[in-house]
Image: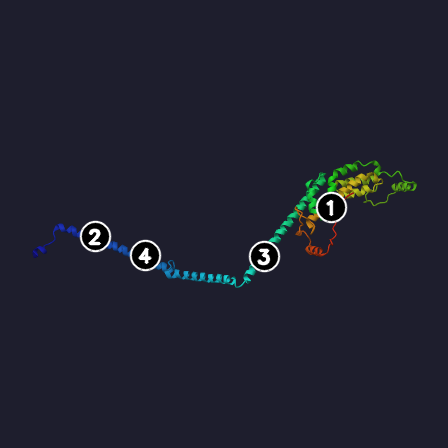
Amino acid sequence: MNDRMTEPTRPHDRPRNANNTRKSGLRGMVLAVLLAFVLGAGAAAWIAWRTGWIATDQDTAAPQTKAGAANDGDGAGNTAPAMAAGPGTGAPIDLRLNALERRLNRIDLQAEAASGNAARAEGLLIAFAARRLIERGERLGYLGDQLRLRFGNAQPNAVRTILATARDPVTLEQLRQGLENLPQETVEKPRDLNGWERVKAELGDLFVLRRASAPSPRPERRLERASRLLDEGRVASARALVASLPNAERAEGWLRDARRYVAAREALDLIETAALLEPRNLNDGSGQPVRQLSPAAPAGADAAVDEDGASEGQAAPSRTAEPAA
């Protein structure tokens, strides 16, 4: 038996021992690789923790605790005014109501100002449209009703003058043609002069003293200057020259038309000014008075309006155009 146990290894057992040795070496290598990986991961985690890349539970719990405390503080702060605004104390509610009332008043004032400025702008556009129709010699149509509605209280005489001119229009071209067609007797001496007046007229034609720069007083030259003034649109100056002619009564019809033309333009100027500056008597499209002062009004106009409103039935005089005959 002892000989059997101590007998040498047989040749066929040598490969089995070699395989076992090879497996043991491979297992050791795998264990070494795993150990190196674990050590590397641990080192990386330690470095990340030291540099602050990884937050611990205590680090995350601290901000949450602070946020909770802050929320509790805000809740307490919000609760305090709510408790203060409860039924026990009415002061905060009154303050809020007063602030809301002031805000509503500002909104009302802004809306009133916008409405007043819009009404003034509409009135100015209507005045411009009426001027254009008058210059063309056309009828006003519905613009006449708008003029009565908006400017009837502020400038009644001007409105009447414009409406009368629109019913019987006079244009600048008509005045030019009328001036050219004036009879020759207009520039001649009156034939019904007595002896002494005729002598003075003849002597006046013989000797005329005037400055070199002064225009000639001869009737023919005055008529020519009147024609040039009409071309420039200066109807009032042309009318004054024609009225100074020797036989001006022969141009009575032309003078009347020129007077109506000038009166209509002055009336249009008045309603345009009223649309911009009238403080009290201007109306909007619905007939309601415009309370808002114009942005173009001079400083202190609001105080003047208040004083006029406080006076008993005394209205400030306003410039109005008398209706043309």
In percent of width and height, residue 214 lies at: 81, 44
Disc number for residue 158: 1
Inspect the image, locate mark 3, and give the three-letter code of the amino acid beneath it.
Glu
Estimate the spatial distance between the alpha carbons at disc 3 and disc 4, rounded to whole Å.
70 Å
Q: Secondary structure at mark 1?
A: helix
Inspect the image, locate mark 1, and give the three-letter code of the amino acid beneath it.
Ala
Inspect the image, locate mark 4, and give the three-letter code of the amino acid beneath it.
Ala
Circle nearer the N terminus (3, 2)? 2
Is 5 drawn above or below residue 285 in the view shown? below
Q: Quadrant of the N terminus?
A: bottom left
Labels 1 and 2 touching (C-beta < 8 A): no
Q: Which residue is mark 3?
A: 101
> Does 224 sit left or right of 136 as displayed?
right
Within 10 Å of disc 4 (Cα), the crowding (few <14, some 14-19, many 20+) is: few
Circle nearer the N terminus (3, 1)? 3
Q: Which residue is mark 4?
A: 41
Circle nearer the N terminus (4, 2)? 2
| Of labels 1 and 4, the one closer to you | 1
Q: Secondary structure at mark 4?
A: helix
Q: Which residue is mark 2?
A: 23
Labels 1 and 4 touching (C-beta < 8 A): no
> Does 80 sit left or right of 178 as displayed?
left
* Total numbered badges shown on the rendered structure: 4
Disc number for residue 299: none
Estimate the spatial distance between the alpha carbons at disc 4 and disc 2, rounded to whole Å.
27 Å
| Of labels 3 and 2, the one closer to you | 3
Estimate the spatial distance between the alpha carbons at disc 1 and disc 2, rounded to whole Å.
124 Å
